[in-house]
C-alpha cells in the first residue's frame, strides 16, 4: 500500500471520529445536566475535535508536504500551511476563511488545556460551539472531501500507489 492510500485511510478514519464528536456535541444538548457540566462537556469535545483535525493536518504535512513544522509555533504554522496552495504538490486543504475560524478553535484548545474547567467562560464556549455547529464542521467536511478527491486523482492519474512510490 502506497503513501497516498495510507493517508486516505487515516483521513477517512479520523473523519469518522470527528463525526462521532459532532454527534456527541448534539447529544450533550439533550442531557439533563446543569449548564456548568454541559459547558465542560462541550469544551472537551471542541478540544477533541481540534486535536483530531490537527492529526489529519499532521498526516498531510508528513505524507504530502514532506515535513511537519517544528518549533514553538508549530501548531499555528501547521494550520497556516494547510491554507497554502503548494504549486505542483497539493492544493490548499482549507480556505483562508476556514483557517481563521480554526485559529480560534486552536486558541481555545490551548485555553482548555491550561485552565481549570470551572474557569471556562460560558459565553466564549457557547460562541465557539455556535460557530462550530453553524459553519466550521460543514466547512471542514467539504474541504477534506475536496482534498480526498485530489488524493484520488493522484492515485488514478499516476498509476502508482502514491507520492514517491
Image (cartoon, rainbow, N blue to C red):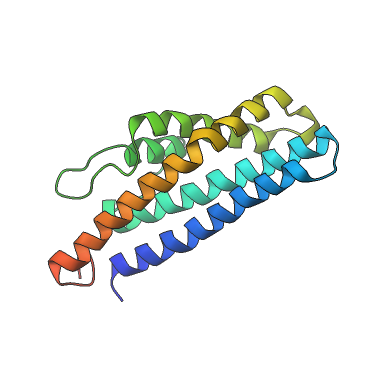
Nearest the viewer among 113 and 15 is 15
* Quadrant occupied by the N terminus: bottom left
Furthest-bottom residue in view? 1
- The residue located at (69%, 40%) in the rendering is 42
- The residue located at (52%, 29%) in the rendering is 104
- The residue located at (40%, 49%) in the rendering is 57
* In this rendering, position of residue 53 left or right of residue 158: right
Residue 56 in view: yes
The vertical placement of 125 against 15, above or below, is: above
The vertical placement of 47 against 104, above or below, is: below
* Residue 140, percent from left and from top: 43, 43
The vertical placement of 14 against 86, above or below, is: below
* Residue 78, percent from left and from top: 39, 41
- The residue located at (20%, 61%) in the rendering is 154
Nearest the viewer among 102 and 63 is 102
Count the numbered circles shown.
Answer: 0
Residue 121 in view: no
* Quadrant occupied by the C terminus: bottom left
* Residue 83, percent from left and from top: 32, 37
* Residue 6, percent from left and from top: 36, 68
The vertical placement of 102 against 156, above or below, is: above
Nearest the viewer among 107 and 129 is 129
Q: Quadrant of residue 76?
A: top left
Q: Quadrant of residue 66?
A: bottom left
Amino acid at each position: 500500500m502506497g503513501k497516498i492510500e495510507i493517508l486516505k485511510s487515516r483521513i477517512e478514519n479520523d473523519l469518522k471520529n470527528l463525526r462521532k464528536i459532532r454527534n456527541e456535541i448534539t447529544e450533550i444538548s439533550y442531557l439533563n445536566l446543569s449548564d456548568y457540566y454541559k459547558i465542560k462537556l462541550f469544551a472537551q469535545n471542541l478540544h477533541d475535535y481540534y486535536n483530531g483535525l490537527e492529526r489529519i493536518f499532521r498526516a498531510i504535512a508528513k505524507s504530502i508536504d514532506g515535513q511537519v513544522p517544528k518549533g514553538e509555533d508549530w501548531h499555528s504554522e501547521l494550520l497556516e500551511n494547510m491554507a497554502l496552495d503548494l504549486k505542483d504538490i497539493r492544493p490548499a486543504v482549507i480556505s483562508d476563511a476556514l483557517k481563521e475560524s480554526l485559529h480560534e478553535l486552536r486558541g481555545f484548545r490551548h485555553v482548555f488545556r491550561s485552565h481549570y474547567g470551572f474557569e471556562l467562560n460560558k459565553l466564549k464556549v457557547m460562541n465557539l460551539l455556535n460557530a462550530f455547529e453553524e459553519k466550521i464542521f460543514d466547512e471542514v467536511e467539504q474541504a477534506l472531501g475536496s482534498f480526498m478527491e485530489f488524493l484520488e486523482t493522484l492515485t488514478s492519474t499516476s498509476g502508482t500507489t502514491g507520492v514517491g512510490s
